Amino acid sequence: METNVLKKVDIIFDITDCDYLKILDRCMSKTQDEVILDIIDSGLKGRGGAGFPTGLKWKFTKNEDSDVKYVICNADEGEPGTFKDREILDRVPEKVFTGMAICGYAIGAKEGYIYLRGEYNFLKKNLQAKIDLFNKQTIEKNFDFTIFLRSGSGAYICGEESALFESMEGFRGEPRNKPPYPTIAGYNWKPTVINNVETLVYVSMICNLGPDKFKELGTKDSRGSKVFSVSGDTPNAGIYEIELGMPLEQFVDAFGDGDTKAVQVGGASGHCVPRKNFNDTIIGFEGIPTGGSMMIFNSSRSMYNVLHDYLEFFTEESCGQCTPCRVGCQQLLKGIEAVKKGDRKPSYLEELKKLALTMKSAAKCGLGQSVANPFNSIIDNFREEIIY
Amino acid sequence: MSSTALLIKDLVEKHGKNRNSLMPILQGIVQEERYLSEDAMINVAKELDLSTADVYGTASFYTFLDTVPRGKNIIRICKTISCHMKGKDEIIETVENMLKVKVGETSHDRNFTLLTANCLGWCHQGPVMLINDDIYPDLNPGKATSILEEYMKAH
Ligand SMILES: Cc1cc2nc3c(=O)[nH]c(=O)nc-3n(C[C@H](O)[C@H](O)[C@H](O)COP(=O)(O)O)c2cc1C
Ligand code: SF4
Ligand code: FES
């Protein structure tokens, strides 16, 4: 397998040679299809967690026959351990707007929305002022694309794309059945591209420097770099842009405190990797993909507490719409509590793991489907800590 | 017309008379009044030509759209894992002692409501709390105390 050494890069926050109006001009001198081909060619995959190829998403949406289409920037950033989108929107918002405008041009959308989580309301004033300026500048270019800012109200599930549309339409943030996918029926049931904040920044970077520059970074399956949010037991908590495809071992060498027991890759809904697997775990789409959350635990931490915290999180944030997730989350939580107290035999954990797998196949959306990731990986690797 | 009714009228005018404006309108009311009263929800329903149950249905889904009275200042302390590891329990205890309330309660003078929240997006600088829309990272009990004292002085 192709692997990289850990390499820090500086693309996302770098603002040298980044005249966003020129980037827009350059894009608009190309045809829509050429722009989409550049994005496909770059190999860019979504940075929000699911990792769908961005160029293909755009192509599907462009191919839909509709007068009204939308671009949505997903800034709901609620995954525990993730804080990079806030930093991006605070420091380089114009790059995000540019990515949205490029998308608008490529798919034929006239409106773009940023859905910002309510917890980031303090960013709104500044962001709105910058959006107003950007909108004025696109009008001056005779480019018909307007960006609007919308807010969430404290619901993690609204980061799920179809729940986000429901929320923007004034409904409870309950995920929809899929298909239809957003490329066909998204916001207001019109063809919609929804991308993560970071994805949109890479779009403007690819249009600025060309797809080849982006392709130089990363591996065959994981092109480019990615912004990681590092927290937990580390002397270097913070935000780092790193080339994709590195072994976790190197990450731990660079960020751990010398006593790292486990890393939770991808937030509460991600996987827990124990020390013995650091060496053969690749951070990227060929290994463990991540929206960027890296939580480091040292040997002083109880993995029971960690799992308990995650399960409380899911129990609270489940939208409650489907039974496997609504009841499943509660039962997993009660289940590990019962095993800990001795009310249930340790073998009950096997039943609980089966329940988590049932949720993976029967839950309606990614929230319920991914609870098995932390649950089974923590139970498998830290069984003693859960029982005793 | 009551002040709430006037506020709603303004918000409807600003955001438009359609369902897509429901969230911004409800958020605008909460911004001013800290919660959605029954009157407010009935009024919004009338203005947007929706059923009141529909408006309540949406409002009750969202943590930040409270439907019970809240204090003038809402404190939300992050309780998720990274902040847990960095000592959120001490912060909660400090604030509880200062305000003489437990999590979920509102102080007698109605100046403060104390709540916990899931990850606020500052995990590298935990523990952290939001007071209304303002964020306070890198907390320790002493720092939390002086921040709250400032808010208390302001009232
Ligand atoms: C429960 C849940 C929460 C999600 N939260 C976010 C989020 O906060 N930000 C985000 O970009 N994507 C989030 N997603 C993924 C989105 O549904 C969607 O895949 C993503 O915005 C697509 O953008 P991308 O292709 O650029 O990654 C979430 C998914 C689920 C199931
Ligand atoms: S899986 Fe959970 S969050 Fe998703 S729709 Fe079902 S209940 Fe709601
Ligand atoms: S865990 Fe507290 S801000 Fe993320």
Image: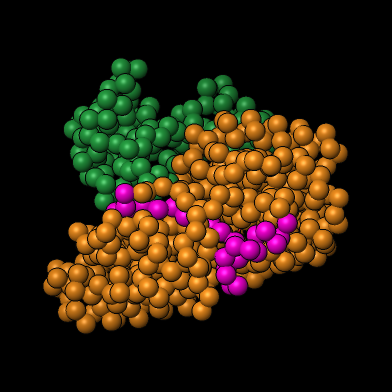
Chain colours: A orange, B green
A244 horizontally vs A248: left or right = right
Q: Is residue A219 magenta?
A: yes
Where is residue B12? Give x, y as percent. 64, 33
Q: Residue at x 25, y 36 (%)?
A: B140
Report the residue at 44% width, 52% height from top.
A229
Residue A145: in magenta span:
no
In this view of the protein, which residue sits in the foreground, A83 or A6? A6
Q: Position of residue B91 (x, y in %)?
A: 24, 39
Give the image quarter of residue B106.
Answer: top left
Front position in the image: A74 or B60: A74
- Residue A240, compared with residue A345, is above or below; it is above
Measuring from the top left, give residue B51's x and y in whole percent. 58, 46
* Quarter location, residue B129: top left
Residue B72 against residue A108 in the figure, above or below: above
Q: Residue at x 65, y 44 (%)?
A: A95
Q: Quadrant of ligand 1?
A: bottom right
Snapshot quadrant of residue A299: bottom left
Query: Residue at point 62% right, 41% down?
Result: A15
Q: Is residue A105 left or right of residue A278?
A: right
Give x and y (percent) for residue B29: 52, 32
Residue A75 is at least partly visible in this image? no
Q: Nearer the viewer, residue A362 or B42?
A: A362
Quadrant including the C terminus of chain A: bottom left
Look at the image and give the residue range highlighted in magenta: A210-235
Residue A161 visible to the viewer: yes
Q: Nearer the viewer, residue A34 or A243?
A: A243
